[in-house]
Amino acid sequence: MSFNPKIKVADWQGKSVWLIGASTGIGEALARKLSGLGARVILSARNAERLAVLSNELPRSSPLVMDFTDSKAVEAIWHKACEAAAPSHMPEMVIVNAGSYEPMLAQDFDLARAKQQFEVNVGGPLNVLAQVLPAFAVAKRGHVVLVSSVAGYRALPKALVYGASKSALSYMAETLYLELANKGVAVTLVCPGFVKTPLTADNDFEMPALISAEEAAEHIARGLAKGEFEIHFPKRFTRFLKVLGWLPRSLYFKLVRKLL
């Protein structure tokens, strides 16, 4: 069996997608994009009002309010998502997009805020994987999409906690791919650069290669259509970061410290 199956998603008609973190930003734009392509989108987030408004605008969508840091809530909503995915009996794709972003410098370290970011960016996805992976493994089908960040590539200023949490998520995606590639379950890692969303609105620095949430959704849809494992964008920025990542630490530190 081929170790590197390219599971291309070009035809979304009737496909059931559970999208977690769907109420704003990239999640909302992606929900609109996939619904427009014909997918049945099951929308989850904490904000019930925004989910209801979005669901009313999108055909074949279902709002399921959920705090994914609550493992019991995730378990209950997973069963509801499976019911909403009928007739397929469970979503064919699960996109874990929800996350927390808060810049933090070492000299401003706050333990409570740090733990909260890890609870959302790592604990939340783990709660989802605890439900999804056993079901996909038994069915020998399914597609897991984890939305990480280019901040997880290597250390960056002001990303002490956020970058570490996203690095953990990227590591999980790579491991899942290695272990599930021959078992019928697809895994995709999404690493956006700077995207104009409510989470980045308070940044006090110029964000290079800033794109809209709608552009981000287009990049993700195109990457899924090509069967890419890692979807990173915008490439004029992410490729530069990848090149930086190949540098030895001494040179990398010298270059990046200039950003402080």
Image: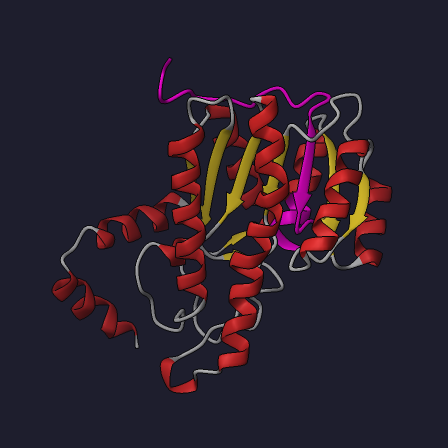
Question: Is residue 209 visible to the viewer in this orientation of the structure?
Answer: no
Residue 73 as seen in the image, left or right of residue 204:
right
Query: Which quarter of the picture shows residue 253?
Result: bottom left
Quadrant for the N terminus in the image:
top left
- 99 is higher (above) or lower (below) than 113: above
Question: Is residue 241 visible to the viewer in this orientation of the structure?
Answer: yes
Most foreground residue, 131 or 49: 131
Quadrant for the C terminus in the image:
bottom left
Residue 211 as seen in the image, left or right of residue 68:
left
Q: Can residue 241 be found in the magenta stretch?
A: no
For the magenta stretch, what is the residue range? 1-29
- How many numbered discs? 0
The residue positioned farthest toward the bottom in the image shown: 107
Residue 22 as seen in the image, left or right of residue 80:
left
Tell me what residue is drawn at x 53 percent, y 59 percent: 121
The residue positioned farthest toward the top in the image shown: 1
Tell me what residue is drawn at x 68 percent, y 38 percent: 18
Tell me what residue is drawn at x 30 percent, y 59 percent: 154
Residue 44 drawn at (x, y percent) = 73, 48
Tell me what residue is drawn at x 45 percent, y 61 percent: 165
Specify the principal SS of the magenta part.
Answer: loop
- 79 is higher (above) or lower (below) than 248: above
- Display coloring: secondary structure
Residue 151 drawn at (x, y percent) = 39, 59
Q: Can residue 10 be found in the magenta stretch?
A: yes
Most foreground residue, 89 or 19: 89
Residue 137 drawn at (x, y percent) = 55, 28
